[in-house]
Amino acid sequence: MLKDLKELKNKAQEEVKQANTLRELERISKEYLGKKGELTQILHSLKDLPKTSRAEVGKETNEIREFLKAEIDKKVSGLEETDKKEEEKKEWIDISTPAPKPNLGHLHPLTILKRKIEEIFNNMGFATIEGPEVENEWYNFDALNIPKNHPARDAWDTLWLKDDDLLLRTHTSPVQIRYMEKHQPPLRIIVPGKTFRRDATDASHDVQFFQIEGLMIDKEVSAANFKAVIQEFFRQFFAKPIKVRLRPGFFPFVEPGFEIDMSCLVCGGKGCSTCQKTGWIEMMGAGMVHPNVLKAAGLNPKHWQGFAFGMGMDRLVMMKYKINDIRLFNSGDLRFLKQF
Ligand code: FA5
């Protein structure tokens, strides 16, 4: 019997040694020490043993029980300790590691250069003014010397809103009237803002684009002043010599009127899809403010005169960054936007 006990002890000890999980140790403990465990069964059957060996077997069995219990406890705390260390390793944070960079957005190319344009004009004494994108017929047309049924309305036919005489403004020129109604000359303003047209789109036309209106009114302002202001603007904006041409143009709200083109910087003036193969790109309309416009705004044309211009801002930005298609601006294409 004592020999059997010794073998049982060795077997149990080996199993504890091999066990790698708490669950296995639990099974071993149940198998040997549990209510129906092998050592417990031996203790229960002591009464059936001859009196001579009963005490000795009982003592030996109890010693093995204690021994096995201690072995299992030791192994359990060992395993628990390793588990804890593993957990800690997983949770360990190196507080000196640089944090991942937050994904910051950045300004749209139109916004970047709108700010630059404003800065240049502000430095020349022009205040930046805003006006409504939803206009009425009076400010967008009539007050600008474009009465109903005037053929020039066709060029700016637009998106009309239901009811009333409201429309999405086709140009920033209405703000000239709104400003002159409320402010006495001398005055110098620029008006950057969104404009809307029912145009067919191509590389240099979109249905929504930005214009920068300019207006300077004083006692003696001439077309020569306009030329000087615009030349200075181009000089600062492009920071390199630019070929510009002035040609006569018709706008009912100026007299005389001009159109200003610049040599296409996308192709270097050779001709491409951006400049419709002409080598030139139309940047703005301009002219001396028509007396009827001054009158519509409540100013006496005998006392005041001045120039006005309306630049296509998207085209300016296209020239500066050599962007060959205006439709990229509103495409939401990150491959394009991430370049700025
Ligand atoms: C006007 O809108 C006039 N209000 C400009 C003006 C103001 C003239 C003050 C005289 C005095 P025009 O329709 O030509 O003019 O447009 C002005 C500029 O806006 C153009 O030279 C061009 O650069 C830009 N532009 C016009 N249509 C589009 C379009 N569909 N997409 C992008 N840019 C455009």
Image (cartoon, helix red, strand yellow):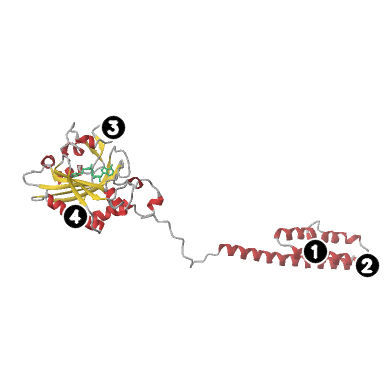
The extreme left residue here reads 302
Instruction: Report if residue 179 is visible in the image.
Output: no
Task: For mark 3, give the secondary structure.
Answer: loop
Please give the name of the residue rendered at 84% of the width and 59% of the height, measured from the top-left corner: 41
Residue 74 image point, x, y percent: 71, 67
Q: CA distance from mark 1 to mark 4?
A: 99 Å
Q: Quadrant of ligand 1?
A: top left
Frontmost of labels 3 and 2 is 3
Q: Earlier in the sequence, mark 2 or mark 4?
A: 2
Instruction: Estimate the x, y position of residue 203 in percent, counting from the top left.
Output: 32, 44
Instruction: Please name which of the two marks, 1 or 4, marks the residue nearer to the observer.
Output: 4
* Residue assigned mark 4: 231
Left or right of residue 327, residue 10 in this image: right
Q: Is residue 73 above or below residue 247?
A: below
SS of the residue under disc 2: helix
Query: Does dot 4 land on a helix, a strand or a loop?
Result: helix
| Position of the C terminus by quadrant | bottom left
Name the mark on residue 162: 3
Query: Circle 1 sits on which residue?
Result: 12
Q: Nearer the viewer, residue 329 or 137?
A: 329
**Comparing labels 2 and 4, the label whose residue is closer to the camera:** 4
Q: Nearer the viewer, mark 1 or mark 2?
A: 1
Quickly name the residue at label 2. Answer: 52
CB within 8 Å, label 1 to label 3: no
Disc 4: CA contacts within 10 A as few (<14), some (14-19) or many (>=20)? some
Residue 89 shows in this picture? yes
**Earlier along the polypeptide chain: callout 3 or callout 2?**
2
